[in-house]
């Protein structure tokens, strides 16, 4: 099985989010600012992405009869966390096609060395995150990006699901980021991707049908007297049930 290059945000979020003081006046693209962030390649300009999206959508429709359902639930501006189940390496493209705004992803840093894949990940807004290590910069950048009105895509199951399409146990990273930033979560269900590219296959199949369902936004709220970990556990289970309801 190929290694997973898109990973979840879990305990790193709660550890670093409360230790880092962000300067909201600096831009997310700042390469060597007061926050001490190491530089990352800039993504493609938004006007280029506006051209690419309809092309990618047409390709997806032709190859996998992809449908995007209830895309009106996508928030057009303001900070947003997009949480989706993870079935294939194509998921970021499927999820992002109708999202007409800059989107960021956190990805396994080693994947940036893969031929072609690494370059595409940089161009489309992925940030490298170490699997082994505790570098807070990617988490810091994600939180700042969200606070400044950006959107971040997260796969709470942390890796591709089972061959039958079922999900792994969700991690609380998405909910913890929502608690830290006060922004809503957009739950997304990818259905049928497991038949297009089973996790036991090296390459995707042609044909099949893929549907991407955008659920209504949910707001994460901590109950009175409830600690952060309990809130994260409860709300992560709610998020999981929403996403699984459309599988």
Image (tube, grey):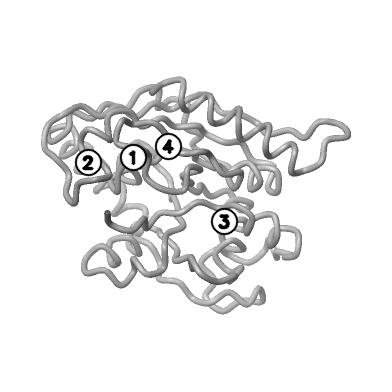
Any mark on residue 46, and which? none
Residue 217 left/right relative to 6: right
Mark found first going from the N terminus, 1 or 2:
1
Q: Residues within 10 Å of mark 4 (few under 14, many from 20)?
A: many
* In contact (CB < 8 Å): disc 2 and disc 3: no
Q: Which residue is mark 1?
A: 87
Q: Residues within 10 Å of mark 2 (few under 14, many from 20)?
A: many
Screen quadrant of the N terminus: bottom left
* In contact (CB < 8 Å): disc 1 and disc 3: no
Q: Which residue is mark 2?
A: 197
* In contact (CB < 8 Å): disc 1 and disc 4: yes
| Local secondary structure at mark 1 | loop
Q: Could you tell me residue 176's position as x and y percent?
A: 66, 46
Instruction: For marks 2 and 3, give the CA distance.
Output: 31 Å
**What residue is rendered at 52% in x and 75% in y?**
31
Any mark on residue 85, and which? 4
Q: Residues within 10 Å of mark 3 (few under 14, many from 20)?
A: many
In the image shown, does 242 or 157 lie closer to the viewer?
A: 157
Mark found first going from the N terminus, 4 or 3:
4
């Amino acid at each position: 099985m190929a290694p997973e290059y898109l990973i979840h945000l879990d305990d790193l979020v709660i550890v670093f989010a409360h230790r880092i003081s962000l300067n909201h006046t600096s831009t997310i693209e700042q390469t060597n600012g007061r926050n001490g962030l190491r530089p990352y390649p800039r993504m493609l300009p938004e006007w280029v992405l506006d051209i690419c999206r309809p092309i990618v959508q047409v390709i997806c429709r032709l190859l996998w009869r992809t449908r995007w359902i209830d895309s009106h639930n996508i928030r057009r501006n303001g900070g947003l966390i997009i949480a989706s189940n993870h079935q294939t390496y194509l998921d970021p493209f499927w999820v992002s096609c109708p999202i007409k705004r800059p989107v960021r992803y956190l990805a396994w840093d080693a994947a940036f060395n893969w031929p072609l894949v690494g370059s595409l990940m940089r161009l489309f807004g992925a940030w490298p995150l170490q699997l082994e290590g505790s570098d807070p910069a990617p988490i810091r950048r994600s939180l700042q990006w969200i606070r400044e009105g950006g959107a971040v895509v997260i796969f709470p199951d942390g890796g591709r699901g089972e061959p039958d399409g079922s999900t792994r146990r969700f991690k609380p990273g998405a909910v913890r980021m929502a608690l830290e930033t006060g922004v809503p979560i957009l739950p997304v269900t990818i259905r049928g991707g497991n038949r297009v590219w089973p996790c036991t296959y090296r390459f995707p199949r042609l044909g099949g049908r893929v549907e991407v369902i955008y659920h209504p936004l949910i707001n994460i709220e901590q109950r009175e007297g409830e600690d952060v970990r309990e809130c994260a556990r409860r709300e992560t289970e709610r998020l999981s049930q929403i996403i699984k309801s459309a599988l």
